[in-house]
Image (cartoon, helix red, strand yellow):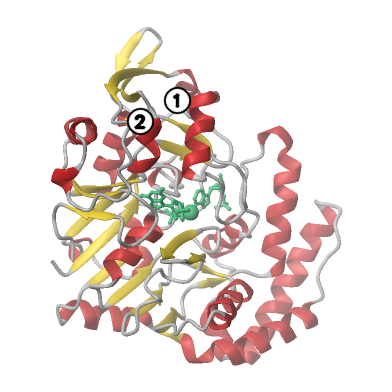
Amino acid sequence: MSSTAIVGAQWGDEGKGKLIDYLAGHADVVVRAQGGNNAGHTVVVGDNKYTFHLMPSGVLYEGTLNIIGNGVVFDPEGFLHEVDKLKSKNVKISTIKIDERAHMIFPYHKRIDELEEEARKEQEIGTTRRGIGPCYMDKIERSGIRVGELLDLEKLEASIYYQVERKNKLLEKIYNADGFDPKKIFETYCQYSAHLKEYITDTTILLHEALESGKKVLFEGAQGTLLDIDLGTYPYVTSSHPTSAGFCTGAGVGPNSFDEILGVVKAYTTRVGKGPFPTEQDNETGDAIRKKGHEYGSTTGRPRRCGWLDGVMLKYAKRINGLTGISLMLMDVLDQFDEIQICTAYELDGEETSYFPASLSALAKCEPVYEKLKGWKTDITGITKYDDLPEEAKTYIRKVEEIVGIPVKMVSVGPDRNQTIVRETMI
Ligand code: GDP
Ligand code: IMO
Ligand code: MG
């Protein structure tokens, strides 16, 4: 097995960081291909906890090559802050390369993100306010400024002056807000250029060489399937493609580059931000999940909305991504329940369906049909072998496999690297 794509199968925060870090111990290359520092990927190693936003989650292993691909929206300030934080912890970070085609986030993107959210009032999306949407807007509009321009300061200066003039008109006339000083932005980005030069290259060449020579490559998804701009719960989504197809355009590889496409699935469901959530438990059950799972955003600190596992959503995620297996995360959070529910279908307008609806208003009307399973009421955090799991936990896992129709290949029973049960070697 040489290349594995890791995709969030729900609304993000499924435990991708933990899984990537675990698998990265046996990988040569780890690649991020979409999103930006809206992501928050937590890695726990012994007493140390790291939260990566832009940094691929393989940086803790010396010898891995970590790539920030062309499809990422890159915030230089955020990235350098992450580098400094790791250095202050005396972490020896492995090689990082940033693709010269990746689009850059500027202060005006963050400001517009904030102002747009405020203007939407009750209709706010609940973005991370990191400027992700506005940066992708410029990219699609073909006026964005790419990382490669940090290597050509004359061009960068012209681009910044052009863009800031346009954005200032927007800020002043539409939002009634203050504009930015292009000179100041240019000076700041010149400083970033000095710090970032060593990282910038055409990463597709490195990646193609790695794949062609049979190196082990891990594609690290950020966000999750239901946050996909096309196939997610639009408009309550992010502005990129967190689905497996996003790795192709976001890292510059063909769809036949993956030997395995692993869906990362939390043993229940969470989401941050707004939008319908059929299995949400806005009650004591949800509170109990939040408490045990520490369900607060790693990027914004917001409490995550919590609910039961949604099999309809997972089946949709399997089809969209071409998932070949599941890594079931945070199983231990369910240790506490006498009874666990799992959604097997929706009831919509009096009819049962197992299809995830395209329309958001239809989704908002969906009533989950639950199957009830007996809880295991045992602390599973120290279990390292599948066979040692309580029978009820195995029944739960089998139920997931039956509903989604693919095998659960890994089970995570705690945040630490060691709390991982492998049923089938991934890489
Ligand atoms: P990501 O964005 O998909 O990488 O997920 P986050 O890091 O935002 O959120 C997952 C949270 O669950 C983090 O706090 C992890 O440390 C934690 N975590 C991951 N796997 C497990 C697990 O199996 N059990 C428990 N209790 N926590 C886990
Ligand atoms: P990881 O990689 C969970 C959500 C935001 C908001 C919506 C749009 O840690 O799983 P954006 O700032 O992207 O324009 O916000 O998407 N969102 C995430 N939710 N996990 C994430 O990343 C997310 N990244 C964005 O909360 O609802
Ligand atoms: Mg996260």
Whether the residue carrying mark 1 lies under 8 Å from ligand 2 is answered with no
Kindly report the distance in space between the C-alpha atoms of the residues bearing marks 2 and 1.
8 Å
Q: Quadrant of the N terminus?
A: bottom left
- Whether residue 234 is visible here, answered yes or no, is no
Q: Residue at x 67, y 83 (%)?
A: 189
Residue 71 rendering spot, x and y as whole percentages: 43, 66
Residue 406 rendering spot, x and y as whole percentages: 16, 41
Residue 163 rendering spot, x and y as whole percentages: 70, 71
Residue occupied by mark 1:
278
Toward the top, the furthest residue is 350
Residue 27 rendering spot, x and y as whole percentages: 25, 73
Front-lying residue, 72 or 9: 9
Q: Residue 151 falls in which quadrant of the image?
A: bottom right
**Compared to 196, does 424 lie above or below?**
above
Tell me if label 2 and label 1 are in contact, CB under 8 Å. Answer: yes
Q: Residue at x 69, y 85 (%)?
A: 157
Q: Earlier in the sequence, mark 2 or mark 1?
A: 1
What type is the residue that disc 1 sits on?
A: Pro
What type is the residue that disc 2 sits on?
A: Asp
**Compared to 338, does 173 lie above or below?**
below
Q: Residue at x 46, y 47 (%)?
A: 229
Res. 310 mark: 2
Label 2 element class: strand
